[in-house]
Amino acid sequence: MTFESQPLAAVLFALGSSLLLTPAVRHLARRIGMVSHPRADRWSKQPTALLGGVAIFASVLLGSLVLLNDVEHGPWIFASSVFLFVVGLVDDILHIKPYQKLIGQIMGACIIIMGGLALPWTGSPLLDRTATLLWLVGITNAINLLDNMDGLAAGVTAIAAVFLAANFFASGQMAEFYLLAMFTVTLIGFLVFNTNPASIFMGDCGSMFIGFFLASSALLHVSGGRSTSLLSVLAVPVLLLVIPIFDTTLVTVMRKLSGRAASQGGRDHSSHRLVALGLSERTAVALLYGLATIAGVLALCVRNFPTDVSMVLILGFIVCLTFFAIHLARVQVYAQDEPLSPNSSALTGFLIDLSHKRRLFEVLLDMILIGMAYYVANLVFYGPLGDDGALNLLVNTLPILVIAKLGAFLAAGVYRGLWRYFSINDVVVYVKGTVLGSAISVLVVLFLFRFQNFSRVVFVLDGVFLLTMTVGCRLTFRILRGFFPMPHSFGARRVLIYGAGDAGVMLLREMHNNQELGCVPVGFADDDPLKKGKTINGLPVFGGNGSLPKICSDNRVKEVFISSSRISDQRVAEILDQCRKIDVGLKRLRIQFETLQESNLDADLPTNGN
């Protein structure tokens, strides 16, 4: 194997570009105010320029102009990585929601899968592509989380890229070798300015770009049967990226065990724990560099050593990492008086966090529903799908549908609503999103496949099934939420709502949603004889007109809430008299609109007196 002059020139050009562009971007970031300021949950201690990922991206782009066309699947990798760079850049500037970033990552992963790259781990095309999607999204987020100390993310990624390039060289994949060499020297050029004390951070545009680029490039080594053994196929990608995987796993598990949200920031990463043990920042980063290097060497050994020897080495390395994780887990990184979640149980904390911040769950659920709806539509039209053309068409076009429909859902506003308030208006939004997603899917399939061997009926059925599934999930959640009321705290008061109208229903919802009120509604009372014996949201409507004392006694009522302002003052006085006789409290709900003026606001402002 010989080294060619043109690819080598491209590698050197990428290094020079990185060394020149990084300080230029640093200067620009400071000029426009794109600076990271110190925060309690972040490690940096001084204002530092952001957007270093722009310099990394531009340098890789310039080098790729020469190298990319020689790499099989290279354009797909670069197109999806560019998309992830844009998503990260938007997040750096606008600070988008986590679920919006997740949708972008899923779309980028689907582009890779459409290009024909996959982890050949199971032998099933559908399962392999699902594993590939999880791999790409997982590694992208792992590198993003690893960017928590000066030089850590860029350095670990560069080390992984070095050993991945070595694997390409050993396999005779010279075009891929040069591509990874160019990527490596770009990161090295950035590290000149990112090593402690860093003068520039890469930001999300950098971490998401390099994480996705490396994760997708690793597929070039295992996809298409290039690896020499099954163990190499399974182990090499994981070993090359073991440090970000290790750090993400440690942080997630420890936050959950401590009753904290896994998505929140904090100084509890493996690098932070090493510093808490007494190491300097440079030493902590160097130690993680060393572990990444050992894992890279092990990845090279796996492809050349006998399977039994490789298994022993891998198991030994896993044992060492496990003991290392246990040692780091013992480090106190959370303040003793720091507030925890309502329940510090790992499982309960996860469920609380999932129910409170449901957007990521919604995106993942909808992605599953998109696949299920498309599969059921093909199953209904074609019958059982075996190893035939229909199954191949489904597998090849499923990434297109995921991209189109998640994007349509996001554009239509599907993820702006709350499930607990799901209504007809939300159904209209879901109809719009489904129709838009189906239309885009059909247009893309028509453009890419000329709609050959496809049936329009399948796409119609797919839209109907998807709409039914998505609306059904939201509606079922609301039904179950009403069927199983939220638990009330010990000592909550049993309350009777007087007035079985719209205001009464509104008051009932507030009691269900606001547990701080400490109220357990037992039913309604109303003077209208036509409403007696009916039920509203599962609660009975009792009569009024003098029967209030018996109702309160039979249902152990402690308070009566008058929900309607239409009840006359005379009737309110009668209810008050009845409540006093049976020692039951009485409250009245009033909704008033106050016209605010500057004088009203001034009167409410606090004074500067002692």
Image (spheres, grey):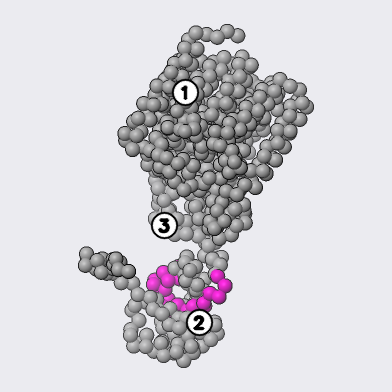
Report which residue position mark 3 lands on.
424
Please, is residue 323 above or below residue 608 in the view? above
Residue closer to the observer: 1 or 44: 44
Residue 430, numbered label: none
As measured in the structure, the alpha-carbon distance from the residue carrying label 3 to the one carrying label 1 is 55 Å
Give the mark nearer the N terminus: 2 vs 3. 3
**In this picture, which residue range is highlighted in magenta?**
489-509
Marks 1 and 2 in Cβ contact (< 8 Å): no
Report which residue position mark 1 lands on.
189
Give the mark nearer the N terminus: 1 vs 2. 1
Q: Secondary structure at mark 2?
A: loop
Few, some or many residues within 10 Å of mark 2 (<14, 14–19, 20+) = many
Q: Quadrant of the C terminus?
A: bottom left
Residue 558, numbered label: 2
What residue is drawn where x is 54% and y is 29%? 155
Marks 3 and 1 in Cβ contact (< 8 Å): no
Tell me the amino acid under the disc marked 2. Lys
Whole-percent x, y for residue 56 in the image: 44, 26
Q: Secondary structure at mark 1?
A: helix
Tell me the amino acid under the disc marked 3. Ile
Comparing marks 3 and 1, which lies closer to the viewer? 1
Few, some or many residues within 10 Å of mark 3 (<14, 14–19, 20+) = few
What residue is drawn where x is 39% and y is 26%? 23
As measured in the structure, the alpha-carbon distance from the residue carrying label 1 to the one carrying label 2 is 72 Å
Is residue 437 at least partly visible in the picture? no
